[in-house]
Each structure stands twice: as structure tokens, then as C-alpha cells.
Image (tube, helix red, strand yellow):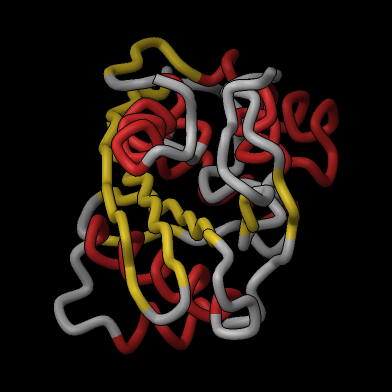
Amino acid sequence: MGMWIARQALVVASRSAPRRAILEGAGIPCEIVPADIDERALESAAPDGEPAAVAAMLAHAKAAAVAKDRPGRLVLGADQTLAFGGRIYSKPADRAAAHTQLRSLAGRTHALHSAVAVVEGGAMLFAHVETARLTMRPVSDAFLGRYLDAVGDRVLASVGGYQLEGLGIHLFEKIEGDYFTILGLPILSLLGFFREAGHVAQ
């Protein structure tokens, strides 16, 4: 018997490979159904633009969009914002944007806000945001070029332009916060909800 005791697999409204790996590593079977929403439009419509609130709003929007067509299914939405200097960063559009973004973060501390929401039908059952703070070491343009050559298009897949679980670890000198939060899914709080709700074994 596995740890997941809900009737059906969890629907995950995200393309994120790290999030899927975290869930499956915890024994939670996933059905991947990426949400079709305009994230940038929703960000710009956020009432106060506070980074943690933006992440929470996007996580809920993703889960709600997918749950609408899947009555009776548990749908998980997740999102992450990177905040530094009063600005919210998005995934870089290309290598040049990634270089500019990493250069602006080098030698400084930024915040990652990771939000998760679970929706069933039209009801939000669980919502949570956790924050981690990461300090990037000072790096040269030559090092950034080497790093970007090594990671290739993977640099475009994350909000920070790095994957901490891979070569991105070379960019940092200090990390404060939960590892899973940095990867984009605060799994410990999520598992607490699933236990309370009777979806995973206690």
C-alpha cells in the first residue's frame, strides 16, 4: 500500500518538472494538466503587487482554471515569485535576459515566494505561501557566460534563471529557507493538509 489513499490521482496544474518530482517522490500520483492562463496579465491586475500575494493569486488561478473542467477532482496549483529591489522577476525570455537578470542579482540577497493552492470544484481547500532568502555570490561576466553555456535552455525554465538542484548551486553563497520552497513547492505544509483531509496515510 502506498502513502496516497485518495480515490484518484492529484491533478497538478503545472508543467514544472521539479514540482512533479517532489510530489512523486512523496508517493503522490500526479495527473499533469497545465493551466492555460495569462500569468503576466494576472500579475499586472494584482491589487497591491506584493510578491507573496501575487504568487498566491497565480497558484489559485491555475488550480481554479483546471478544476473548472474536472468536478470532484483535487487540483493543485503552484507558483513562485522572485522579488528584489521592489521588482518582481519573471522567467527570462532568452539568454540575454537571463544574463541581465543574474547580473542584477549577483552579490545580493533576493526573496523567493512559493505558493500552493488546492481546489476542488469551485472551492479552495488549502492555500499557503512560504518564503526563502537566497544570497548570490559576486560573479564575473566570464563565469556567467560559462554557466549559461553549461545550462543552455534550462535557464529559461525557472523564475530566477537558475536551478538550485543543479548547476545553479554554483551561483550562491548563502541560503535561508526550506529547500522544497526554493524548488517551488512547500511540500511539508501541503502534506500536513493532505493528512488532515485524509488523502495521505497518517
User: Relative to residue 63, is residue 116 depicted above or below?
Assistant: above
Number of callouts: 0
> What residue do we see at 52% from left, 32% from top?
183
Location of residue 33 (image quadrant): bottom right
Q: Nearer the viewer, residue 72 or 44?
A: 72
Q: Nearer the viewer, residue 128 or 102?
A: 128
- Residue 54 location (% of width, % of height): 30, 67
Q: Is residue 30 left or right of residue 190?
A: right
- Residue 5 location (% of width, % of height): 57, 34
Q: Nearer the viewer, residue 37 or 172?
A: 37
| Quarter of the image with the C terminus in it | top left
Q: Is residue 166 left or right of residue 158?
A: right
> What residue do we see at 39% from left, 57% from top?
117
| Quarter of the image with the N terminus in it | top right
> What residue do we see at 34% from left, 23% from top?
135
Identify the residue at the far left of this view: 48
Q: Nearer the viewer, residue 32 or 180?
A: 32
- Residue 133 location (% of width, % of height): 28, 29
Examine the rendering and report whether any part of residue 136 can be seen.
yes
- Residue 187 location (% of width, % of height): 43, 31
Q: Is residue 187 left or right of residue 24?
A: left
Examine the rendering and report whether any part of residue 108 can be seen.
no
Q: Is residue 171 left or right of residue 31?
A: left
> What residue do we see at 78% from left, 41% from top?
154
